[in-house]
Image (cartoon, helix red, strand yellow):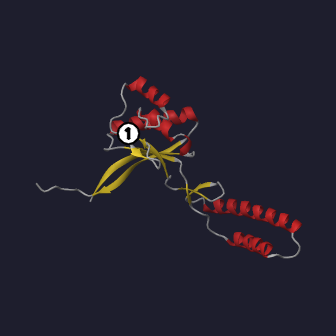
Amino acid sequence: MTKQVVGFIVDTNSYSGNFEREMCAFMTGVVGECEVGAKYAHRFLDEFEEELNFITDKPDDHGCYRPVQICPTAGVWNNGMGFYYRAGEEKVAIEHWKNNMILRLEKQLEQLLQTTVGDSDVVQKIKSDIQKCKETTEPAKNIVHQSILIHVHREPTADEIALLKERAELFGKEEGIEIIGYRLLLEERESDTLSI
């Protein structure tokens, strides 16, 4: 088995589903079948005359071929209450989660007690859930999609990577999106041979 580069990843500080096609078009000049990001691709083509030739399309969940998709951001999680955190920030993440969950449950309990006589099963369940929240020590690690994955059919050269980074930084600056890193996606592939 050999490893082959199949993608160029840009990690950001924002949900990438709001801009992945536009960012890719701005960085590469390439748009998918849906043509979302065409105005950004034109800006690239005005400067570089042709799109980058190592970008490839893959079908999305609906069969629309696109050069980019959103992907999970390595080392960043959501605690389940919209709070993003990194390794080392677990204590802050669990406190945020506890405070919000307990507040929600206490509001539910208060509303329920105004309409329910006595200790119903639902009231006991909410009280039990509040206690479980107080005892929770580890935050949830829900996947965060703040990255884009641009599909490539070969490994970009050092100059091509420098251009991709430069274009990503410029897009981020114009759109108010912080770029936090870059990665290459590797995939294991078997070397096939054909007997002749």
Q: Which x, y percent locates residue 5?
A: 33, 49
Q: Which residue is mark 1?
A: 161
Residue for point 42% across, 23% down: 46
Q: Which x, y percent locates residue 104?
A: 76, 61
Quarter that holds the N terminus: bottom left
Report the amino acid beneath label 1: Ile
Vertical placement of residue 84 versus 17, above or below = below
Residue that lies at the very extreme toward the top in this rendered image? 46
Q: Which x, y percent locates residue 44?
A: 43, 28
Q: Which x, y percent locates residue 52?
A: 36, 34
Residue for point 49% across, 28% down: 39
Residue for point 65% across, 59% down: 92
From where the camera sits, is residue 166 visible?
no
Residue for point 53% across, 50% down: 145
Horizontally, residue 62 falls left or right of residue 80, namely left
For this rendering, which residue is in front, 1 or 169?
1
Horizontally, residue 112 falls left or right of residue 64, namely right
Vertical placement of residue 45 versus 163, above or below = above
